[in-house]
Image (cartoon, grey):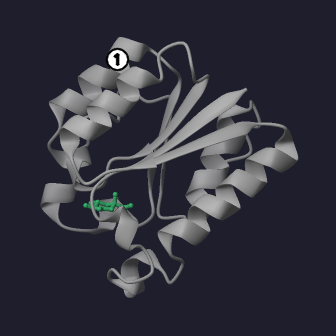
Amino acid sequence: MTIAVINGPNLNLLGVREPEIYGNKGYKDLCREIKKYGKAKGIKILTFQSNHEGALVDYIQSLLKKADGIVINPGAYTHTSVAILDALKAVNIKTVEVHISEVSEREDFRQVSYIRDYCAKTITGHGTKGYTEAIDFLCGEENV
Ligand code: DQA
């Protein structure tokens, strides 16, 4: 099984960026942990981050016939991007939406998610643990 974990804009600055909201763990450490978690489960984890909408669309397209599941935190593009929604629909790979923060308790403009209805599950406000919970869900372990 192969799962792609995709992060959108500004998530490369995890650990530095608003740590009171997003925590102290850096993006590289997060990727290392997720890959280790996958390895222990016998799953191949691919990681990708970009600050560019088109690069995220290109990467999602590249997963066709390559990944069995997608975990995506589109960052701010969550609230704006029809292109990311369309790319996910195009490849038709089971997808979980993850947000580190509890977006439902934040600004009005964060209340819209273009991808939410398409995703099999959404995990918000669990910090970076949300990524491994999403992996568990994609593996059929519905304890989240
Ligand atoms: C986020 C929430 C978004 O509103 C924000 O733009 C992000 C991160 C989260 O993980 O909580 O960049 O997706």
Which residue is painted at 53% across and 23% down in the image? 94
Q: Position of residue 60 (x, y in %)?
A: 38, 28
* Quadrant in which the N terminus is drawn: top right
Q: Is residue 22 above or below residue 3?
A: below
Q: Position of residue 6 (x, y in %)?
A: 45, 45
Which residue lies under the disc numbered 1? 89
Q: Is residue 106 above or below residue 61?
A: below
Within 10 angstroms of label 1, few (less than 14), some, or many (20 or more) residues?
some
- Horizontal side, residue 30 vs residue 73: left or right: right
- Horizontal side, residue 33 vs residue 8: left or right: right
Q: Position of residue 82 (x, y in %)?
A: 17, 30
> Ligand 1 lies in which image quarter?
bottom left
Which residue is painted at 49% across and 68% down in the image? 27
Which residue is painted at 26% across and 46% down in the image? 78
- Horizontal side, residue 51 vs residue 64: left or right: left
Q: Looking at numbered disc 1 in the image, what kind of residue is underneath it?
A: Lys
Q: Is residue 127 visible?
A: no
Which residue is painted at 38% across and 84% down in the image? 16
Which quadrant of the figure has residue 58? top left
Q: Is residue 132 above or below residue 129?
A: above
> Judging from the image, what secondary structure is the residue with disc 1 in?
helix
